[in-house]
Image (spheres, helix red, strand yellow):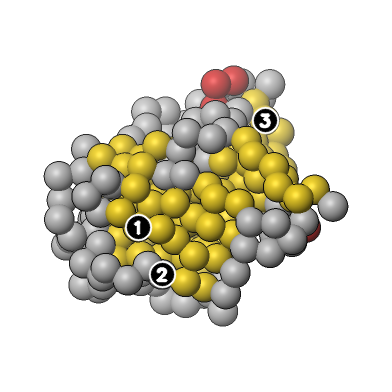
Amino acid sequence: DVKVTQSSRYLVKRTGEKVFLECVQDMDHENMFWYRQDPGLGLRLIYFSYDVKMKEKGDIPEGYSVSREKKERFSLILESASTNQTSMYLCASSLSGTDASPLHFGNGTRLTVT
Amino acid sequence: AQTVTQSQPEMSVQEAETVTLSCTYDTSESNYYLFWYKQPPSRQMILVIRQEAYKQQNATENRFSVNFQKAAKSFSLKISDSQLGDTAMYFCAFMKPGAGSYQLTFGKGTKLSVIP
């Protein structure tokens, strides 16, 4: 089974802090994604990556950046956390190819910015 | 851009009964994939069922089946013999395959409660 591991289940940070959310997958997937989940808004894509050192903006990239230095690891960075970034963050991975493969999700990180 | 609409924010069903969750989508693509994902209270999102648009036969996975109406752009999920473990958020999702663009567009979700 694919395992997608997010380093923290719960995180509390102060406004203005730099925040790193880490995600690791163990199945050699090319694609990795960061989503934000808010009640009533569903899941919204922040950034995704097709390969090492490659990244693409999703629907809501403002205030976030990402890093993918190794294939298995995809980091989400909040350069200066703000209270409106309090949310659930979900990492996911998938295989690349001509046939769309489903996403495999991590357990999520509940981030609170105070 | 594609949009996915789930018109039922919350639903409930008695244990052992059948429930149908609605999903409609808007796209100009002819080839695409549709998914239903389940997120139990423990939070990890898991795939329930997947449908390829070029296949007319509705996908089935044990107690879960879909009613895919391509012309109407409708993709509903039917859960038969509902169990307490089916209590979860359910998300409908659309994927347009293409080189380097494997990403999902999600609906806002339906919270399903199975009542004993």
The structure residue drawn at horizontal position 21% and vertical position 43%, both measured from the top left corner, is B27
Q: Residue furthest front?
A: B17
Q: Residue A107: image x %, image y %?
A: 63, 55
In front: A44, or B49? B49
Is residue A53 visible to the viewer in this orientation of the structure? no
Kindly identify which residue carries mark 3: A112
Q: CA distance from mark 1 to mark 2?
A: 8 Å
**Residue at (52% x, 73% y) in the render:** B61
CB-based contact (under 8 Å), mark 1 and mark 2: yes
Q: Amino acid at mark 1?
A: Phe
The subunit letter for the residue under badge 2 reads: B
Left or right: A53, with A83 as reference point: left
Of the residues under marks 1 and 2, which one precedes in the sequence? 2
Chain letter of disc 3 in the image: A
Amino acid type of the residue tagged 3 in the rendering = Thr
Cα separation, mark 1 vs mark 3, equals 39 Å
User: Which of the 4 image quadrants contains residue A82?
Assistant: top right
Judged from this view, the residue extending furthest toward the right is: B116
Q: Which residue is mark 1?
A: B68
Q: Chain letter of disc 1?
A: B
The residue depicted at 64 percent of the width and 26 percent of the height is A113
What secondary structure is found at the residue carrying circle 1?
A: strand
